[in-house]
Image (cartoon, rainbow, N blue to C red):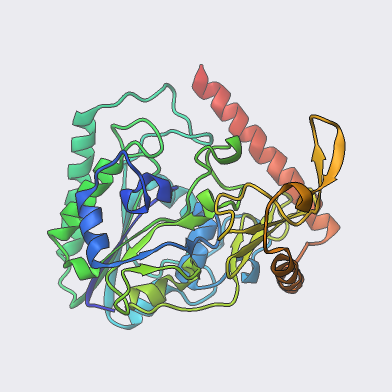
């Protein structure tokens, strides 16, 4: 790992927002220049599609099901495991975290895996989204955006003034920066932050990613946290050039973030994305093996299987060979109406993925699951009340 490194991430950032992954609306010259010089990861997966769970995995290198965590509750003290920040501090790095204060008062309490990093807690977010709507609909204000960017630049300057020989900065931008109105509406501002970082760091010291994506309208769902489909699970990663690769197409989990920062590309047989901890009732676990993806839904006790090479948008669940025709009210064999030439391979992969699922799955006790359901209901009521009050 180089002596001065910065990781820039953005909460709930979808690959679909970025031109390097095919977006046709935004022009992001700084991002595109870094991508042209670096390695673009096309199958980089979050271990969890929500902030605190993702932080805990990406900075400890441990998947959620392997943590000694049963429910989404605050952590007393610090998380009892080695983490990337402690590792870097042991190597002589001075670490800084720049983010919105809501993450320090919220997700931080549920992860606490940041060593002794110096916190720069800012007010840089406009509250939008299903779980933090503001009093009124936001209105675009470019003057506010400019002020907000300057405030971020100032904190970057302060962090860069460190006299330490080795420096690591993690900048985590919020869902929507002040002055903008919705998810994905501030990509030009994001690119300006990248541009400012390029005045402070060499291009081969800048890494671009996110903690998770969001559903972005997939299956007519928005936001994130409850689904492990590709829009939420497969996230951006753009690094300096590694192994002379312009693109990396093998599946990689963000539990290997420290390897990526060290400019190493790890390989795992299985990759996991877990939406909740063991005791939580609405848990979904995705397991990747090559081009195949298996999903288990705890609440409904149902399975899904997708061949991402053949069906990258997960349109047809091929785990069930009998489908219901909702118009004709009949059942029919899927393989008679859906052209898919790899049924035998899919059956072999399903057996492999089911075996791996049984190895890692912990369903929790009946008492634990009951308590988890009560906590979920309480949380949903709290969100509903907050949104009702905010809409008045």
Regarding residue 278, the answer to whether it shows in the image is: yes
Left or right of 156 in this view: 328: right
Give percent across and percent down for residue 383: 59, 34
Which residue, as the protein is rendered here, is positioned at the far left?
199
Regarding residue 13, the answer to whether it shows in the image is: no
Left or right of 231 in this view: 248: left
Residue found 56% across the figure and 49% down from its top:
313
Q: Is residue 383 above or below residue 360?
A: above
Q: Residue 241 lies in what quarter of the image?
A: bottom left
Q: Quadrant of the N terminus?
A: bottom left
Please tell me which residue lies in front, 176 or 88. Answer: 176
Q: Is residue 155 above or below residue 132?
A: below
Give percent across and percent down for residue 120: 29, 54
Give percent across and percent down for residue 104: 41, 51
Q: Is residue 195 above or below residue 2?
A: above
Residue found 54% across the figure and 45% down from its top:
224
Q: Is residue 315 above or below residue 130?
A: below
Left or right of 270 in this view: 348: right
Which residue, as the protein is rendered here, is positioned at the far bottom?
91
Which residue, as the protein is rendered here, is positioned at the far top?
392
Left or right of 323 in this view: 18: left
- Count of marks, rendered view: 0
Give percent across and percent down for residue 126: 36, 34
């Amino acid at each position: 790992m180089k002596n001065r490194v910065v990781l820039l991430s953005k909460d709930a950032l979808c690959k679909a927002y970025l031109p390097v992954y095919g977006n046709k609306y935004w022009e992001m010259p700084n991002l595109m220049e870094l991508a042209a010089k670096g390695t673009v990861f096309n199958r980089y997966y979050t271990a969890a599609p929500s902030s605190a769970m993702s932080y805990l995995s990406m900075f400890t290198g441990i998947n959620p099901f392997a943590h000694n965590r049963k429910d989404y509750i605050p952590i007393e003290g610090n998380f009892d495991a080695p983490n990337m920040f402690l590792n870097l501090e042991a190597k002589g790095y001075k670490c800084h975290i720049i983010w919105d204060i809501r993450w320090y008062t919220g997700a931080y309490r549920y992860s606490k895996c940041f060593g002794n990093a110096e916190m720069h807690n800012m007010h840089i977010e406009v509250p939008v989204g299903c779980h933090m709507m503001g009093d009124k609909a936001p209105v675009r204000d470019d003057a506010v955006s400019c002020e907000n960017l300057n405030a971020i630049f100032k904190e970057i300057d302060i962090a860069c003034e460190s006299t330490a020989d080795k420096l690591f900065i993690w900048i985590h931008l919020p869902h929507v920066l002040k002055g903008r109105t919705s998810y994905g509406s501030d990509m030009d501002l994001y690119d300006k932050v990248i541009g400012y970082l390029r005045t402070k760091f060499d291009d081969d010291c800048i890494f671009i990613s996110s903690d998770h994506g969001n559903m972005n309208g997939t299956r007519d769902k928005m936001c994130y946290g409850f689904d492990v489909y590709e829009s939420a699970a497969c996230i951006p990663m753009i690094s300096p050039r590694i192994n002379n690769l312009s693109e990396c197409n093998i599946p990689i989990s963000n539990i290997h973030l420290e390897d990526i920062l060290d400019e190493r590309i790890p390989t795992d047989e299985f990759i996991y994305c877990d939406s909740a901890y063991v005791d939580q009732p609405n848990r979904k676990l995705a397991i990747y093996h090559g081009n195949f993806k298996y999903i288990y839904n705890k609440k409904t006790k149902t399975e899904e299987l997708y061949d991402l090479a053949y069906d990258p948008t997960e349109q047809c669940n091929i785990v069930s060979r009998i489908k219901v025709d909702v118009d004709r009210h009949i059942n029919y064999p899927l393989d008679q109406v859906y052209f898919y030439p790899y049924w035998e391979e899919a059956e072999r992969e399903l057996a492999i993925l089911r075996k791996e699922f049984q190895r890692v799955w912990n369903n929790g006790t009946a008492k634990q699951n009951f308590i988890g359901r009560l906590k979920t209901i309480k949380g949903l009521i709290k969100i509903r009340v907050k949104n009702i009050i905010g809409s008045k």
